[in-house]
Image (cartoon, rainbow, N blue to C red):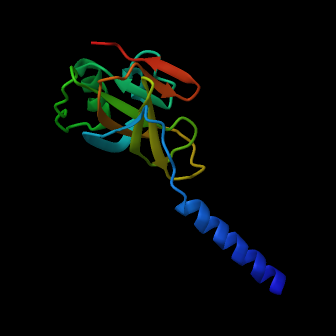
Amino acid sequence: MKTISTLLAIMALTLVSACSTPVTQSSSVRAEPSIQRWSGDYPVAELGRLPAGQQATGVGFFSTAAGFEAAWSAFKPGEAVPAVDFASNIVVFVRNVSFYNRTNIFKTDLKDGVLEVLAMETMSAIPITDKVAMAMAVVPRQGIQFIQAGPTRLPVDGR
């Protein structure tokens, strides 16, 4: 019994030590602030409204008002399209590709011109049928050359 208590104490100290150790980031990593965020359901039948080459990916982006407006009308039918300055910003999105799980973008990091979109989602085994969960966020365009979409990098037009 004493051995188990000692082992648990060592594990607890290790966990505390690991959590209290400062993590250093490369100076080239920049957390990108989200200007606006939305989440909700997106109809599977309207995936064709997503940008070409991004209709099967879990991560993507809109770089034009026309593309964003087309997807927004399926994402939030009846709601006014939010004003986005696409000269200075892009809209990134994450969506389900395997199972229906609520999702939310909580952070975006830019490193060496590559934007990584970090999202959290609920965990379920509900199959995707007529809708997927999607989250979108407006982020500053400056410095973004690519969006990391799994193993693929999606090029972002320069403007």
Foreground residue among 56 and 34: 34
- Residue at 18% across, 26% down: 85
Could you tell me residue 91's position as x and y percent?
31, 29
Could you tell me residue 103's position as x and y percent?
44, 46
- Residue at 24% across, 18% down: 66
Foreground residue among 155 and 121: 155
Numbered disc total: 0
Q: Is residue 68 above or below residue 130?
A: above
Q: Is residue 123 above or below residue 45?
A: below
Could you tell me residue 3's position as x and y percent?
83, 81
- Residue at 40% across, 18% down: 145
Foreground residue among 48 and 59: 59
Could you tell me residue 26's position as x and y percent?
48, 36
Q: Which quarter of the rendering shows the C terminus? A: top left
Foreground residue among 119 and 42: 119
Q: Is residue 19 above or below residue 51?
A: below
Place residue 132 in its image quadrant: top left
Q: Is residue 105 above or below residue 152?
A: below
Q: Which quarter of the rendering shows the N terminus? A: bottom right
Outermost residue to the bottom: 1
Place residue 10 in its image quadrant: bottom right
Asked whether residue 131 appears in the rendered view, the answer is: no
Asked whether residue 67 appears in the rendered view, the answer is: yes
